[in-house]
């Protein structure tokens, strides 16, 4: 049978794939096509990439525009954390739709179905299937089609730690790959991202978690080999969603706009600035649109800015002016090493009160070199073993690639199938 298996090592940088830390990935690359120019989305953030993976579309089309974002609700700009388990359920009530375009779960429901195991934020996991067409397993809740909640041993009761990651990988192999055999099986590991946010890149703790994540990927690669031995035609995609930069400085974008007189107060709804790590989305309420030019000029003059994408150019980065989105900004970066010799430093945008910042540790969200350096390796029909592709690819190409292997149409996606024959 034709099947697709996807393993995502959240936050794994392409330049950190190597024999010493990720021997299973290096071995896998020998029989797969590696994509040497693969990029993330913008923001380069897990919830955004999850929705782009699931739909094959840019944030402009699926509307999950940032890890945090704003929605115009009853004439007011309202801040939301898209990591919350109920965010897309709320968005459906507030705007009439969860994601604005169909997911792989919906497309494949009548064609063998989708099962996802995920250990990232609840909102990122549930972005794969907000309307309940497939099976989603997450520590915050596991759901069968119809969003029917699974209980007890059927649910995924694991921690966000090494033991939980390993248990999830082992259960994915035995239950999903061997027993249940959906058309699309996705294992989205929480590491190395979770540890990278809390420890310096290149530190001993970080290198240890790379080896753990690599071993879990290796478990799936070996299991897929056994499925092929039994005659299954498996497309195996092993990838990450974004890389990481080291945080060298924290910037309070909201406070700077207030101090400059461009936003009334931290709590005001005239301008709202939800952050995604090293990037920020700047929403301006339609009643205050006259202020847009002044805000753009102010942002462009700051020493903590790499790129300000203005309203007329949002489409160039896959964004759109939905809900008053005026600017997408990527914070300052430099290609310099951290204390452990790992390159890539960035400013981090200070999130709302109560949320952590990550000085000297890893972060992502912007357009800088290493956060835009996820890895992608694909093994199966249409992919030359051991080859390197320099094609421009991103997460929107994975849904069309998956659908092509399963002989399903990919109309309505923004990406393209990556098979070469
Ligand atoms: Zn991620």
Image (spheres, rainbow, N blue to C red):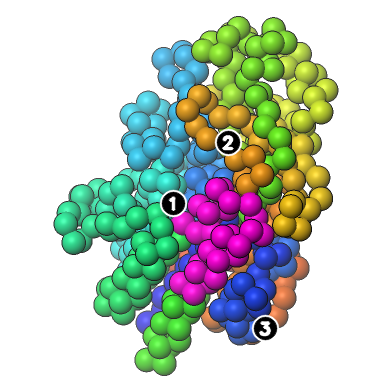
The secondary element bearing badge 2 is classed as loop
**In the rendered image, the vertical position of residue 151 relative to residue 163, given as above or below:** above
Give the total of numbered labels: 3
Query: Where does the image place residue 214, in percent across and percent down from the top left?
Result: 53, 71
Compared with residue 166, is residue 287 higher up or lower down, i.e. above or below?
A: above
Q: Which SS type dominates the magenta stretch?
A: helix
Residue 174 circle label: none
- Which residue appears at 16% of the width and 57% of the height? 152
Image mark for residue 120: 1
Q: Nearer the viewer, mark 2 or mark 3?
A: 2
**Of marks 1 and 3, the one in the foreground:** 1
Specify which label sits upstream in the sequence, 2 or 3.
Answer: 2
Counting from the top left corner in percent of width and height, residue 5 is at: 44, 72
User: Where residue 386 is drawn, which disc sits there?
Assistant: 3
Residue 128 counted in the magenta span: no
Residue pictured at 41% horizontal, 58% vertical: 161
Local crowd at mark 1 within 10 Å, few (<14), some, or many (≥20)?
many
* Disc 1 C-beta below 8 A from ligand 1: yes
Structural crowding at the residue carrying mark 3, measured as other residues with C-alpha within 10 Å and reported as few (<14), some (14–19) or many (≥20): some
């Amino acid at each position: 049978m034709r099947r697709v298996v996807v393993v995502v090592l959240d936050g794994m940088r392409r330049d950190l794939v190597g024999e010493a830390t990720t021997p299973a990935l290096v071995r896998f690359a020998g029989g797969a096509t590696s994509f040497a120019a693969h990029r993330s989305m913008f923001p380069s953030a897990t919830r955004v990439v999850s929705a782009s993976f699931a739909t094959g579309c840019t944030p402009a089309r699926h509307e999950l525009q940032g890890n945090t974002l704003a929605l115009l609700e009853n004439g007011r700009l309202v801040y939301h954390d898209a990591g919350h388990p109920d965010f897309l359920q709320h968005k459906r009530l507030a705007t009439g739709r969860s994601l604005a375009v169909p997911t792989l779960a919906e497309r494949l429901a009548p064609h063998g179905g989708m099962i996802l195991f995920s250990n990232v934020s609840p909102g990122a996991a549930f972005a794969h299937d907000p309307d309940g067409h497939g099976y989603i397993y997450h520590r915050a809740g596991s759901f069968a089609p119809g969003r029917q909640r699974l209980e007890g041993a059927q649910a995924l009761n694991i921690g966000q730690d090494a033991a939980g990651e390993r248990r999830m990988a082992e259960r994915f192999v035995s239950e999903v790959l061997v027993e249940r055999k959906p058309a699309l099986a996705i294992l989205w590991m929480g590491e190395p991202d979770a540890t990278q946010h809390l420890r310096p890149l290149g530190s001993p703790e970080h290198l240890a978690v790379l080896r753990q994540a690599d071993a879990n990927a290796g478990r799936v690669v070996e299991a897929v080999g056994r499925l092929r031995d039994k005659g299954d035609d498996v497309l195996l995609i092993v990838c990450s969603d974004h890389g990481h930069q080291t945080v060298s400085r924290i910037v309070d974008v909201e406070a700077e706009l207030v101090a400059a007189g461009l936003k009334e107060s931290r709590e005001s709804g005239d301008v709202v600035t939800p952050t995604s790590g090293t990037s920020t989305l700047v929403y301006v309420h339609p009643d205050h649109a006259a202020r847009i030019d002044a805000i753009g000029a102010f942002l462009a003059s700051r020493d903590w800015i790499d790129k300000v994408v203005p309203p007329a150019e949002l489409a160039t980065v896959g964004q759109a002016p939905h809900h008053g989105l005026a600017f997408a900004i990527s914070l300052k970066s430099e290609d310099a090493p951290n204390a452990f010799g790992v390159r890539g430093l960035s400013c981090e945008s200070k999130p709302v009160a109560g949320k952590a910042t990550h000085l000297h540790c890893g972060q992502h969200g912007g357009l800088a070199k290493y956060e835009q350096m996820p890895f992608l390796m694909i093994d199966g029909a249409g992919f030359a073993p051991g080859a390197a592709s320099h094609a421009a690819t991103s997460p929107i190409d994975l849904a069309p690639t998956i659908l092509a292997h399963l002989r399903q149409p990919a109309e309505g996606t923004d990406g393209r199938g990556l098979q070469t024959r």
